[in-house]
């Protein structure tokens, strides 16, 4: 691991140093785990209790927490953001030499920009264009006519189907499937007839697509992710969905066809968003919620129910299933009873 | 793109033409996006407002909507179905020449029918049989003893485990896993003991299996999908499930072990169906619902709750968790209060 | 299929035989499907009705059910566990010869133990260590610095990212992704900034990871699965989650970052567990539930609502969304009405 003087880190990221600038930092650790040589951060009050006994060598934190630190600190207006930038010093660097592995199958008509790396057994189809500096892992399949931007990171075993367009600096995690057939079916007297899916997937710059996440191509028009959209693992994005810039979606969420999600939304995990509806920019949806209609205004929405002890819950469910009748009954005039007198 | 005379399209699909039959059609577009040369369709009333200003060159629609079209039309009893068939004219055709890529690893005992295509790095095990005209993408693994029917389409990076049987004209999307071990565990004093999963997966004709969907092999008997079953992406089908013909299931749904789903069901996305239960033929289950017991009769079932503003929702949840007690309290005789007089 | 004398099976697994020990057993079947030569088991009372007419040749069951069997029986204190062990006799054996396929790409610095098998097109990175007897399927990618224990079974198309540590006798099913980037993002005025994910995934002995399940690497510390953890398909385990020994989780469940799940928990399918919370050892969580806070004590928790007919359900939902107001209204003193007299 490389080591850095704390004072040099402070200068590099424009942070105020308090304490010994000669402290050497060679990695990161949590406050509670700690270890000599590591830098940590304090951004979530829940973890403040670990500060005073921490065994790390330095901490990134806000000015108002600095007094309690037993070790040198870097003061940041946003400690988590400052930590994110510092931690990048300790990430495993990309291999120095860009290499197209000998086993790669590349169509003669594909174009790979300068400094691309392609891992073993990856298959690149006809007319594909890959921007400079993009690194593609092993076992990927990039079908005909795809266009990938510069400085991308495509992990192993990713499938990108024909005609997909991906912007610069995107990160696609292992097993993701982008641009496969949308789920379009027309009923007929002989069974289901496939509706050809003739649109594409268009992904902007700086997007992240999680492991085993799936994004379907459009049926007629395209499925679109704008810039800086961040999708966690195991998310389903159906045909003709549009997701606005900077929107973040947590794992296991599904977005049905033609849903239109605005910019800057935060959508929790295990949410279901139905099709042909609109979610306004800046909307926040809590985990395990169902969005079944267009939301009228920006806000924080929810419909998840936290667990309770199963026996009590089952009784409540039994009543819930009769709730409408109960309300009607209660709202009807209470007939006067003999015993009331 | 090939171009087609509108009059020729009308004859080919048995539709009534109204307007200029010499109109050239070279692709599809939505009514709202439009473009010269494209054909569109009107099947969902929600989109009717886009008809009168559309810039497409022709529209497939029902007789009663024809009067409002500013462009030539094709009249169809079922415009969506007619569109599905017309749109197939503009799908990217399969490559002309069937090819077994040089990098494919095929066991000597496997049999590939006439006109099969197999993409780079795909691995085909001992005793596998692939029907005529089936096309298999790159990076697939088809284990020993599998049987695939004719005219199938297996996308890249699909895994089909040993002994799986798949019928004719099936479509398997990227990353799908068919026939892996069912989740069978027996508790013992030394921890969990694996229950061998000795059944297979049997899939009928004309089925579609979505991207990254998983279908487990049976524990003792087989897991079975009948003909024309259509599964969207990221669906889990556990061991010994049976799904009846023509049933359609939307993304992110999970079906637990030994559930028996009848024919012609429509199951929404993000539904959980528990094990050892029966869903009658023709049942419709709305998205984000829980099926925890056998359903007594065909019908339309639901248990999802749409979002509301989180602050209001949290108050409702607090009351829901006490609902049984509240109902009991309310149903008890209201004691007469002094202030009532 | 090999055949075994029923008497020999009884001796081998320490079970009491009642009936003809010369009965030959060559496989398994359910009681209801049955067939000559098969052995079945009776562990779930729901299936007892099939015993008296079964066509299998022998049944493993508890002493109190033995009297009703029309065929020879093996008496077991735990018939399902005994069956699990017997059924292993009929599983497809591993290929006799361990083979590293010629197409495998192994870094020169990787170490494979004795008796390892590696399928075609698998890629093994620098510094990887694979324990003796571990079998790795085709199309896998095992990145730099991973350590896998002995006697493991890695199915095809699995991705194991750099630095992952996996114990002995683990089973990883197709398409699983272990150790990919956690979903760490810090907001900035220029959009989302990636928080480097510098921890690893550490998996103990005897674990099972389901098909297309994803387990993210830790952000700072590691993501940890202790011994004998069993995960079904399509599960998401986020960064820095800890799952205690012997815990079993069913399909489609998601566990958010830094959740701490105790030992011996049983978590149903399609459950959402939010982050930074604790689930005590021995907790049982029913399917389709939301765990949004630390659970105070071991118990059986739930929040799923079973379906009812959609029309009735929709009326109940409308009332639920006003429940807090309704309770407040009802609890307010009922003003005495004229008609009460």
Image (spheres, coloured by chain):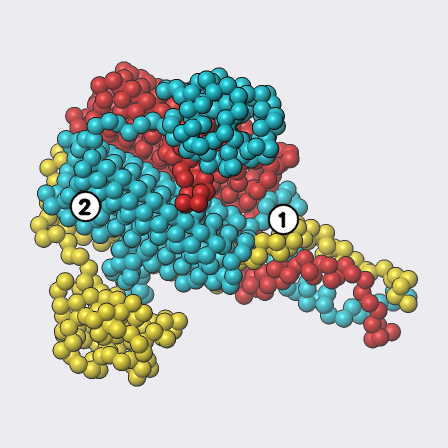
Chain colours: A cyan, B yellow, C red
- Label 2 marks which chain's residue? A
| Vertical position of residue A252 compared to residue A13: above or below | below
Same chain for the residues under marks 1 and 2 in the image: yes
Residue drawn 34% across the image and 30% down it: C161
Vertical arrangement, residue A254 with respect to residue C205, above or below: below
Could you tell me residue A76's position as x and y percent?
A: 51, 34
Q: Nearer the viewer, residue A37 or B252?
A: A37
Is residue C340 visible in the rendered image? The answer is: yes
Q: Are the residues at dot 1 and dot 2 in contact (C-beta closer than 8 Å)?
A: no
Identify the element where label 1 is drawn.
helix
Could you tell me residue A274's position as x and y percent? 44, 58
Which residue is drawn at the image coordinates 38% and 48% (left, top)?
A229
Image side of residue C177 versus residue C74, left or right: left
Label 2's element? strand
Report the residue marked by disc 1: A314
Residue A5 image-quadrant placement: top left
What residue occupies the far left of the structure in this picture?
B97
Query: Which residue is located at x 81 percent, y 60 percent?
Result: B333
Q: How many marks overall?
A: 2
Q: In the picture shown, does residue A108 fall above or below C146?
A: below
Would you name the residue on which mark 2 appears?
A129
Expressed as whole percent of the image width and height from the top left, the position of residue B339 reads: 89, 63
| For marks 1 and 2 on the same chain, the one whose residue lies earlier in the sequence | 2
């Amino acid at each position: 691991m490389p080591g850095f003087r704390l004072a040099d880190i402070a200068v590099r990221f424009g942070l105020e140093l308090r304490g010994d600038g000669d402290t050497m930092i060679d990695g990161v650790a949590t406050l509670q785990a700690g270890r000599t040589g590591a830098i940590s951060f304090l951004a979530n009050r829940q973890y403040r209790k670990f500060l005073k006994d921490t065994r790390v060598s330095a901490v990134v934190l806000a000015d108002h927490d600095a007094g309690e630190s037993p070790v040198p600190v870097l003061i940041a207006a946003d400690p988590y953001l400052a930590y994110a930038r510092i931690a990048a010093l300790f990430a495993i660097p990309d291999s120095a030499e860009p290499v197209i592995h000998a086993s790669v199958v590349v169509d003669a008509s594909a174009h790979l920009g300068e400094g691309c790396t392609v891992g073993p057994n990856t298959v690149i189809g006809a007319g594909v264009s890959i921007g400079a500096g993009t690194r593609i892992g092993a076992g990927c399949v990039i079908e005909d006519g795809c266009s990938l931007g510069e400085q991308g990171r495509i992990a192993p075993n990713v499938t990108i189907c024909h005609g997909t367009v991906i912007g610069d600096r995107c990160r696609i995690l292992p097993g993701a499937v982008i641009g496969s057939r949308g789920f379009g079916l027309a009923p007929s007297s002989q069974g289901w007839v496939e509706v050809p899916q003739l649109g594409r997937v268009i992904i902007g710059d700086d997007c992240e697509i999680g492991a085993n996440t799936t994004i379907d191509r459009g049926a007629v028009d395209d499925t679109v992710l704008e810039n800086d959209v961040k999708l966690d693992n195991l998310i389903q994005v159906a045909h003709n969905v549009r997701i606005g810039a900077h929107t973040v979606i947590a794992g296991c969420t599904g977005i049905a066809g033609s849903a239109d999600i605005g910019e800057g939304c935060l959508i929790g995990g295990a949410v279901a968003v139905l099709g042909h509806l609109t979610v306004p920019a800046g909307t926040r949806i809590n985990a395990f919620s169902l969005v079944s209609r267009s939301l009228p205004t920006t806000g924080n929405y929810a419909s998840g129910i936290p667990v309770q002890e199963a026996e009590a819950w089952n009784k409540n469910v039994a009543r819930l299933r009769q709730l409408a009748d109960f309300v009607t009954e209660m709202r009807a005039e209470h007939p006067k009873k003999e015993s009331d007198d």
